[in-house]
């Protein structure tokens, strides 16, 4: 049917058309319309071998077959289908002249689809056959065998299709790699910003802490030297303010991860219980506090006072997010940080951790808010006296312990803060 010259120019045209195809759907469109236009079969599909399941998956199909029946035949077992088995083994075109009378075909599928002639043209990469371009006739179309020239053309067409498919896969992969690199860069830049802010705040705090302790000490001396009641009152106020400012300066030290920690093996289960008890007293009656410890938790080398502070900070934030009541759950379990996790958090170290989740059923956060919550002094509670230090300090503490903290939240869907602390493993 196809003359040699025609074959060459057709194929060239097809190959050119494939150049502009950028998805597998477009590729299939091009293949099917080329098959219709050249060899005149109306229905075509692409099948890919799935070796794990010893099956052949029909990826997409086009043509006037029985549409709903195709859905039921999306994966065809290779066992019991000698044609597909031979296709993969030999890499040669397989033809079923008339599936209605052929004893070797998969009867169940043929009955559902009404296949007549079935042609599978191998798609090969190097020497192995990974799939096929399928085409054929159905029902009233009756059987129709292809000519030698048509078969030759179909094989050339399949080869071009493999090339185009490989090009699409490569382009997809490249795009994904670029996207990931940009995302990692964005995450790292944001983190760098946090680190600099923390260092700056801690640097200032260090000097302030010293100055405030001098003020406090001097005020104390002064208190013993004055007897006038009004003057004494003023001195007490100075002392009180200096103590408060000193306390704040100490908190800021946490931002630069420069606190003196007094570490010892800590049972996180106990810390969770203590935090829950404390929170239970601090939250109103409309808020439930629940805890859950999964199995035996490994010990963690930590400063328990600091860990308590983190849990309370997270718990109070959870409470603040639920003015109309709800549930705070604090859970502890053992967890592994794996490579996938490190992709999302490039500063995380692989290994065993104790994971503490503090979850609430509160109002949640917008993505723009989540981006900034760990920044020192970022707060949406300025009007109610929030300082915006709770999370910044918590992050400093957790990271000074070699751990990490991150948040997931959806506006209206509650929030979860996850704290990973390195487990002591022997
Ligand atoms: N569980 C939560 N649900 C909703 N928003 C939260 C939650 N936790 C934190 N946020 C948001 O993150 C911001 C920063 O929290 P952070 O604890 O650092 O400061 P703060 O609670 O505002 O003030 P404070 O210094 O008193 O803790 C909050 O103002 C709030 O907008
Ligand atoms: Mg807070």
Image (cartoon, helix red, strand yellow):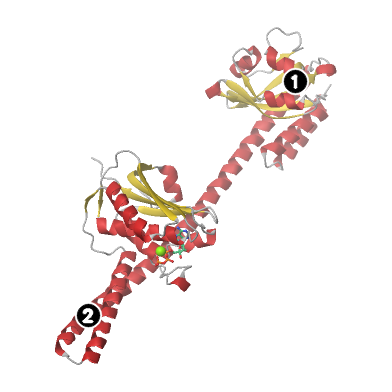
Figure quadrant of residue 28: top right
Query: Which quadrant holds the C terminus?
Result: top left
The residue sitting at 31% across, 50% down in the picture is 273
- Labels 1 and 2: the sequence-earlier one: 1
Residue depth check, mark 1 versus mark 2: number of the one nearer the observer: 2
* Residue 145 spot, x, y in % from top left: 79, 15
Quarter of the image with the N terminus is top right
Residue behind mark 1: 151
Residue 156 seen in this snapshot: no
The quarter of the rendering in which ligand 1 is drawn is bottom left
Is residue 362 shown to the viewer in this render? yes
Q: Secondary structure at mark 1?
A: helix
Name the element at disc 2.
helix
388 over 184 or under it: above or below:
below
Classify mark 2: residues with Cα within 10 Å, few (<14), some (14-19) or many (20+).
Answer: many
Q: Residue furthest front?
A: 285
Q: Which residue is mark 2?
A: 216
Q: Is residue 21 left or right of residue 339?
A: right
């Amino acid at each position: 049917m196809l003359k040699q010259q025609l074959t060459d120019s057709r194929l060239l045209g097809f190959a050119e058309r494939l150049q502009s195809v950028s998805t597998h759907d477009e590729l299939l469109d091009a293949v099917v319309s080329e098959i219709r236009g050249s060899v005149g079969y109306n229905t075509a599909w692409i099948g890919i071998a799935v070796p794990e399941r010893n099956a052949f998956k029909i990826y997409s199909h086009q043509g006037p077959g029985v549409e709903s029946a195709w859905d039921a035949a999306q994966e065809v077992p290779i066992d019991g289908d000698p044609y597909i088995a031979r296709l993969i083994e030999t890499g040669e075109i397989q033809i079923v002249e008339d599936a209605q009378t052929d004893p070797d075909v998969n009867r169940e599928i043929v009955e559902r689809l009404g296949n007549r002639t079935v042609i599978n043209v191998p798609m090969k990469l190097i020497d192995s056959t990974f799939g096929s371009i399928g085409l054929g006739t159905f029902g009233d179309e009756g059987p129709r065998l292809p000519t030698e020239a048509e078969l030759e053309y179909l094989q050339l067409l399949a080869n071009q299709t493999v090339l185009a498919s490989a090009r699409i896969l490569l382009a997809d992969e490249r795009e994904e790699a670029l996207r990931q690199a940009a995302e990692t860069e964005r995450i790292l830049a944001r983190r760098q910003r946090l680190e600099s802010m923390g260092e700056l705040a801690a640097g200032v705090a260090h000097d302030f802490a010293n100055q405030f302790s001098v003020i406090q000490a001097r005020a104390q001396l002064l208190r013993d030297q004055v007897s006038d009641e009004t003057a004494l009152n003023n001195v007490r106020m100075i002392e009180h303010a200096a103590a408060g400012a000193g306390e704040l300066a100490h908190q800021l030290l946490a931002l630069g991860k420069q606190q003196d920690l007094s570490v010892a093996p800590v049972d996180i289960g106990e810390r969770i219980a203590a935090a829950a008890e404390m929170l239970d007293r601090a939250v109103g009656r409309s808020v439930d506090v629940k805890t859950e410890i999964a199995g035996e938790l490994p010990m963690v080398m930590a400063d328990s006072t600091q860990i308590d502070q983190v849990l309370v900070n997270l718990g109070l934030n959870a409470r603040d997010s639920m003015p109309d009541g709800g549930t705070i759950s604090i859970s502890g379990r053992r967890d592994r940080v794996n490579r996938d996790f490190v992709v999302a958090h490039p500063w995380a170290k692989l290994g065993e951790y104790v994971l503490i989740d503090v979850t609430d059923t509160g109002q949640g956060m917008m993505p723009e808010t989540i981006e900034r919550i760990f920044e020192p002094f970022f707060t949406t509670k300025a009007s109610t006296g929030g300082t915006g230090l709770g999370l910044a300090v918590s992050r400093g503490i957790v990271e000074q312990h070699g751990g990490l903290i991150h948040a997931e939240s959806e506006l209206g869907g509650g929030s979860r803060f996850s704290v990973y602390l390195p487990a002591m493993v022997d």
